[in-house]
Amino acid sequence: MGNTDGSDWVRLIVGLVIVLAFSQLNALFLVWLERKVAGHIQLRPGPKEVGPFGILQTIADGIKLVGKELISPAAADRKLFPIAPILVFMPVLVGFLVLPFSPDLIIRDMNVGVLLIFAFSTFSVLAILAGGWASNNKYALLGAVRSVAQNVAYEIPLLLAVLSVVLMVNSLQFSHIVEAQNRFWFIFLQPVAGIIYLICATAETNRAPFDIPEAESELVAGFHTEYSGMRFGLFFLAEYTNMFIVCAVATSLFFGGWNGPFGFDLNIPGVVWFLVKTYILIFIIMWVRWTFPRLRFDQLMNFSWKVMIPLSLANLMLTALVVKFV
Amino acid sequence: MRSMADQFREPIVERVYTLNLGPQHPSTHGVLRVLLDLDGEFIVKADPVIGYGHRGHEKMGENRTYKQFLPNASRMDYLSGLLYNHGFVLAVEKFAGIEVPERAKYIRTVCAELNRISSHLLWFGTYVMDLGGFTPFLYAFDDREHILDILDRVSGSRLTYSYCRFGGVCQDVDAQFVDTTRSFLKRFRSRYHDYDNLVTKNVIFIHRTRGVGVITVDQARQFGVTGPNLRACGIPYDMRKIEPYEIYDRFDFEIPIGTKGDALDRYRVRLEEMEQSCRIIEQALDRMPGGPFWNEAATFKVRPPKGEIYFGFESARGQTGYYLVSDGTPYPYRCHIRVPSYGNLHVLTEVLRGTMMADAISILGSIDVVIPEIDR
């Protein structure tokens, strides 16, 4: 973890401010992008009134959310109810600590970076459960219960897929993993793991076709049914920031991070490569959302336990054997 | 007196809890309320509660003349308003013995079938949306918009039509109507391909609908299920073929049927029905004669003879019927309406038992109920 002299503290505080600013701007941009992508897929223009191409629309919406009253249901748990949105947003921010934007742009290049980011992303499940439980609403509770079951089911193949990469690099440090891909991205060496990761990441972020915890046609709004104003806004922010993080992790683990394809970096800075790849992955996740209907809860679980987990286990075994004997 | 140990052994929580689905739920299409007794995510008992959209149309029918009741007809099932309007006009014409010019019959048929397509399109969109696919909804509405534009131009309204009048229709159609209708049919058939690729062949969609919400033939008979829901069980019962009214016996069209009676069959039957409606429209446009479009003199004084009549027709949701009793005055003594959604909805009490909560939404959507039609 290195030294803790003065420069390190400055680095942390500056990093924190940048992360906070970036995560907010990123979420605003992603909401706008989502609405534009959805619009164009659905033969309509999307937001276009506020600012050029409607880019300021989400800022206007954000201001509206801040100005709204925070309603607490009479029967809600008074302590847990306001805490849940904060709990859901906090672990998402921690993820930025270890993301390798470029060789020089990592806030802390920890030797357990991969472990840390997944440990914290699991934390948000707890917050969702707390929110669903504290709302004292049957729809919210059903949504929260589904969310927990889904996250537990999809975390396993997700981590197994990541483990295959970790085995190949023999390190949990993001910078090492990215450096190992300076010629061949791991998506070419580990295509099964890469696809499993992307599917599970979609499920982890509760996005369609896995948006069962907040299936609006069944559960109204799922676990955040009772939340209003900026509390709802925080759930929303967390969802989009989480989406950025899982795609950024996918970029670093499977798509070469700051590296260009096959060793050609074309004199483009690493951070640009990284962000471009991340946003392309985000676009794909959005594309999927606006194309597919939603799976049923039991089908979703079957898919995880009967297809994804055996497949990722087999992939891990194969990787282990190849690493050992080749 | 029970011992402390006994009290501890008793189950502390009830396994079954009640979930109030609607009337302000995003998937209950209008104002339906279903009380679901759930065990986890499984439905133990489903109890539809109706009546939130009651406006008293039947009572209104008793203190209005036949002509004054005309606008009410399309407000019961607002998605197939023209079919209701058409049916009421046919019932009164038969009752009072009013002659209708040939041209009017063709115009009515074309417009009624266009309305049937628009109703099915709306169902298609909302059903896929219930299953979580938002995009097909807007595609379907895009197509439906063309129908509404066509009907808007001839009838002056987009949703609750009073286009059919006793003895004809209130406005003639022109060459532009024929052209736009033909170009719509061409466009709509090319869209079929899109729908197939986007929805019908989608693995998730098939998994969500195949074997879900099976209505058996016995259940259908017991609850009076009609329309596409009955035809999906494999019974080719369609009023347009069984008791042909208007000029439906002159056209060559088929009654699509399913085999298993599940949600996928209901989906397929409705999609195929749209194609059959296209065929009817094409034939009617080809053969449309000239001449007058409205025997207007007949509408000045509508006074059916003493007696009663039941007139059944096929709306987009099944067999709909007007039961009119006349005492010889210009006001009907009784005006009862048989709506298909009532039977179609109440079969759910049987079908929903033992299914999952998520399936309940799928089944509810696949049945295609319009609640204000039941409440009327």
Image (cartoon, grey):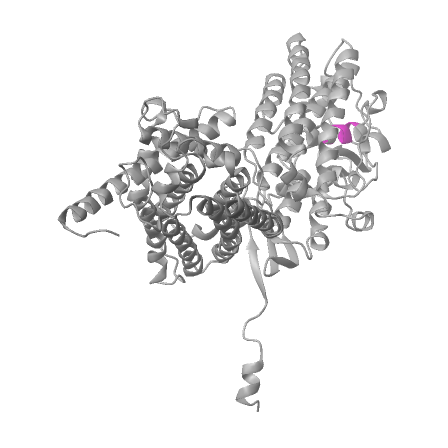
Q: Tag count in the figure?
A: 0
Q: Nearer the viewer, residue A262 or A199?
A: A262
Residue B190: quarter of image: top right
- Using the rendered view, name the quadrant where residue A177 is placed: top left
* Residue at position x 35%, y 46% in the image: A173
Rendered location of residue B62, percent (x, y):
68, 40
For image coordinates 45% across by 32% down, the residue present is: A184
- What percent of the width, then of the height, locates residue A117? 37, 49
Left or right of residue B226: residue B23: left
> What's the magenta bit mostly, secondary-structure-wise?
helix
Give the residue at x 43% y 40%.
A253
Residue A107 position within the rendered picture, expressed as x and y whole percent measured from the top left: 26, 43
Is any atom of residue B339 visible in this view?
A: no
Q: Which is nearer the eye, A122 or A31?
A: A122
Q: Nearer the viewer, residue B102 or A161?
A: A161
Is residue B190 shown above or below A319? Answer: above
Quadrant of res A244: top left
| x and y percentages locating residue A67 in the rendered image | 28, 43
Can residue A192 be seen from the camera position used here?
yes
| B104 with respect to B154 (left or right) | right
Magenta range: B88-93
Q: Is residue A16 magenta?
A: no
- A269 to A243, vertically: above or below: above
Is A260 placed left or right of B270 in the picture? Answer: left
**Residue found at the far front of this picture:** A325
